[in-house]
Image (cartoon, coloured by chain):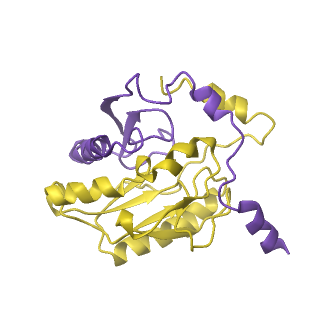
Chain colours: A yellow, B purple
Amino acid sequence: MPFDYLPVFVEKAAGKPVRKLVHPSQNAWHPFVPELASARIALLTSSALRKPEQPPFVPPDDASYRSIPAEPDATDLVMDHRSPLGLTPRQDPEVVFPRAALISLAKRGLVASYAPTHFSFTGGTRNHHGVETELAPALAGELKKENVNLALLVPF
Amino acid sequence: MVEVRSPRAVFVDYPAGRTFGPPKNREQHERILAAALRELPFFTEWGQIRDLPFKWEPGNQPSWGNLREELLRPPLSGAPVEEVIRLRNS
C-alpha cells in the first residue's frame, strides 16, 4: 500500500524538473544509542511548522530552521509547507510533530526527559547542499547545547 | 529512505502526512512514538528500516482510496509565502 501513491507523485510532478536522488557525503551512523531510561529527546520535523511570530519559511530552498517550544500549550503553530497533505497536520500538528506524546512518555517514565526546544525546517527541498552544509550542522549545534542524546526526525 | 540511508529509520504504513495516526487521537500518537523508540536497540548498521506493526483502520479518514484525490490538490497557501518572496525581492 505505501508505494501505491508513488505514481500519483510522478503524475503531480509532470512538467517539473526531475528530482535527483542525493546520497549523503558522510556516514550518519553513530553506534551509541542511549537507553530510553536515560534518553534526553528532541523532535525534528521537516513540515515547516513555526510559531506565528517567527519569520515564515520560504519553500522549497529554505535551509533555515525554527525553534519550537516542547510544550504544545506554549504557542500556536502555523505551517508553511505547501503540500496538500498538510491539511491534516494543520488541524493537529501532533500527527507529524508528537510533542504531547513525548511529554506523556516522559511522565510515564519510558523516556528520561525531553529537550525544552524542538526544531522545525522545510522538507521537500531541492537545496541538498544547504541541508548538509548549513542546516544539519546548525541543528547539531542546537541539540548539543540542549544536551540532547537522542533526536527523532519525523519526515514530512 | 533506503538510498538516503538514515542512521535508524522506522516505517509506519499510514497515509502520507499522518505519521502518528488520525488527528486528535493522542493514545495512538503515543503508541506509535513508543513503538518507534523501542526499536532503537535492534539497529545494527546504517540504512536499516524497521517496520512498525500498525495498520490504518478502514474507518479512519481519509482512506487510502481517496489519497490520490488529496495528493493532486493544488499546493496550500496558508502562510503568506508569496508575500514574503515579494517583500524580499522588493
Q: Quadrant of residue A140?
A: bottom left
| Viewer-proximal residue among A111 and A149 | A111
Q: Residue A34: x, y in percent?
A: 21, 59
Looking at the image, residue A18 sits to the left or right of residue A52; the answer is right
Above-or-below relation of A124 to B1: below
Looking at the image, residue A124 sits to the left or right of residue A114; the answer is right
| Viewer-proximal residue among B46 and B76 | B76
In the image as oriented, which residue stretches furthest toward the right?
B90
| Viewer-proximal residue among A6 and B75 | B75
Q: Residue at x 50, y 48 (%)?
A: A91
Q: Does any portion of residue A108 appear in the rendered image?
A: yes
Quadrant placement of the C terminus of chain B = bottom right
Above-or-below relation of A52 to A46: below
Q: Residue B56: x, y in percent?
A: 39, 27
Q: Residue at x 44, y 49 (%)?
A: A96
Q: Residue at x 42, y 43 (%)?
A: B23
Q: Residue A106: x, y in percent?
A: 20, 59
Q: Residue at x 60, y 47 (%)?
A: A22
Q: Residue B5: x, y in percent?
A: 45, 45
Looking at the image, residue B43 sits to the left or right of residue B80; the answer is left
Q: Does any portion of residue A121 appear in the rendered image?
A: no
